Image: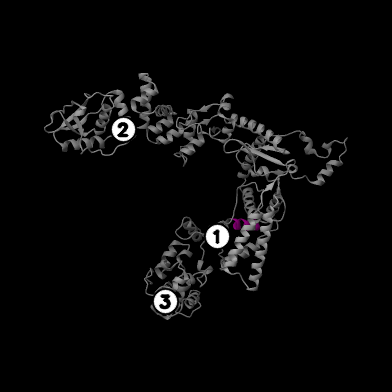
Amino acid sequence: MTNPNIIYVRALDCTKSPHNVRTQSDADADAELEANIGESGIVLQNLIGVAVPRKKGHYSIFGGGRRLDRIHSLIAKGIFGEDFMVPVLPVKNARDAIEMSMAENYFNLAMNPADECRGFQAIIEREKKTPVDVAKRFGKTERFVLGRLRLAGLAEPVFEALRTSEITLEVATAYASTSDTERQAKVFEQMATSYHRHNVNEIRRHLASGSYTGGDPKALLVGRDAYVAAGGHIDSDLFSNTITEIWRDGALVDRLAAEALATAAEAIRDREGFAEVRTIEATTIPYSETFQLARLVGEPVPLAPEAEVRKAEIETEIAEIERQAEEADGYTEEQSDRVEALEEEIGAIIDTQEVITETQKASAIAYVMIGKDGQPCIYEQLYVAVSEDPDEEDEDEDIGDDEDPAEHDGEDAEAPATESYSQKLKDELAMMKTELLALHIANDPHFALDLGTFIMVDDACRAGYYGMPSELRARSPSPRVSGFTSDTPAAQAWAKLDEALDRSWINHKEIHERYDAFCALDDGARAAWLGWAVARTLHAVPDGMTGGSFLNHLGAKLRIDVAAWWRPTARNFFDRITRPAILKLFEAIGGNELKSRYAASRKFDLAASSEKLFAGQIIAEAEVKERAIAWLPGPMRFATEDAEADETLFGDAPKVANDQDLNDAEQMQDDKPVILPEAA
């Protein structure tokens, strides 16, 4: 086999063949290729061409069309001269040229991102090039090259994961959002077994823990210049901007933000005349901060004279419509619509704004927080301090000037009267205190069981009350069908169970009093509350939907005899399926004879007869009666294996008949095909 000889041909004597296998390209990639060729002046890979008949020295290029197009573009721009030569591998015919071009493109392997990063790094270090030089050579932006250099400096475990394709370039970029390689390695190790190990947002969140982004409201409040001037450090994130860059000294940001907010609060108090202005270094006001305060209600703005007149007119018209409706024993549709429109109009009239008077401001507590834009802002709601117990005040007044208050209140004597803490310190102390409490509860399962049961049932029994310091809840889900009520034996039994619960502990005013009273109940009473609390949380899930199989498993595990608790009735089932479906069900239970016996019945009578048949109240053969009493629609069964056996024996309610409108049901033809398994 002879070795192919590569020749050099003038680029302008080469044309791209219409049979070139690559027909699609990428504009950005083409620009990078052109920049690289223009910078280096070298075509690193030869073209594959076939000599053009009767045109000596001319070649039709089947492989390397992109390179040829870029060279022609450089010649047109005057970067290369018209005599620029390109390497060409001549082949005998187009068939061989197409095959070689296909192999050249098909087996082309994209460069590993890690190799690309280290490649840029090697060029800069060995050739003493600048990132600008490298960017120009490869047709990239300087920012792109700097980003790859940042990735080359990743912590070794992270970079190795990128090199072996364990993580993607996007994930590696998330780790590079900080230049702290020790933190990169630590977070990488923490995330190694996490479900979110490839979630870039979670990675960035872990890396930024204890720090702030430049776009955080606190950072915006402090200001970049002030933070840097105070000695703050910023991770210049090459993959983001000043909004997403990392301010690493979180404690410094907190201090500067507190100082800025305190200054703003003082100015607001002087300007607005509030009795007290409290600062919250966040964008929201926590409930725990205000739940013991009374809301300040402003004075309503008086109605304008024309609004008063219109209000009186509306009230007169509504009264007249009500009089007419009372005489006619009901509203017409037009009257109902008119009353609704008038009530909406009068509501808009009387819904005036409130005004806080200067006198009210003088006793008001205002909160200053950080707006989303980083600017200090006053919380929309004002408060007034709840007055102290008058009896306690009187007791304090009774103490003589020459008496020692410590003799009357030992607890007060232990702490200086001037003792005060910042809100942030109070929050931190509360977290540490709760942490200690949680540890001891976790190590006492019996205590935790009583506590958990109490928290759930206290919340459920005192709906609308606040103050429970726990996230544990056992609230009943919203009903899947609005307004649905059930009169089944199970519903009646639940009502009796609920009524039998010992509620002697509920009416105590304070939480701790209710808790002690609950713990004083006997074991059986507390266990009943636990079962009630857990059971009421279950969702109603139709068969086939997510969670339904778990409910079926629970029912099967409890060995629930559904047929003993629930039977299909006209109200809960037969009125809801079509007449042909009921007759098919009769056929499945008792064959054609039973179906024919009721074939002429109206839908109403048929539903009533069905209820009696499936309750065992109709005289029938023992086998038919047994089948009817045992039959259940598929969605009411718990055990999968029992459902399969019952379907084989009795069939199921036809799927095409379910959830049909009753009017449509009456219009369905008896001979319309219905999907139903054959009866045994």
Mark 1 and mark 3 residues within 8 Å of each other at the beta carbon: no
Q: Position of residue 500 (x, y in %)?
A: 65, 63
Which residue, given by chain and number where applicable, does mark 3 sit on?
590
For label 3, the SS is: helix
306, 77: nearer the viewer? 306
Q: Is residue 526 magenta?
A: yes
Q: Which is nearer the N-term, disc 1 or disc 2?
A: 2
Q: Which residues are magenta?
A: 525-533
The residue wearing badge 1 is 479
Identified at 64% across, 30% down, the residue is: 259
Q: Amino acid at mark 2?
A: Asp
- Dot 2: few (<14), some (14–19), or many (≥20) neighbours within 10 Å? some
The reply to whether the magenta stretch includes residue 300 is: no
Give the number of the mark in front: 1 or 2: 2
Picture disc at residue 58: none
Q: Quadrant of residue 239?
A: top left
Q: Amino acid at mark 1?
A: Pro
Q: Is residue 649 left or right of residue 375?
A: left
- How has the structure been colored for display? one colour
Q: Secondary structure at mark 1?
A: loop
Instruction: Report the residue that reaches farthest toward the left.
Output: 54
Q: Nearer the viewer, residue 100 or 599?
A: 100
In the rendered image, residue 642, in percent from the top left (x then y), is placed at 44, 64
Prevailing secondary structure class for the magenta stretch in the rendered image: helix
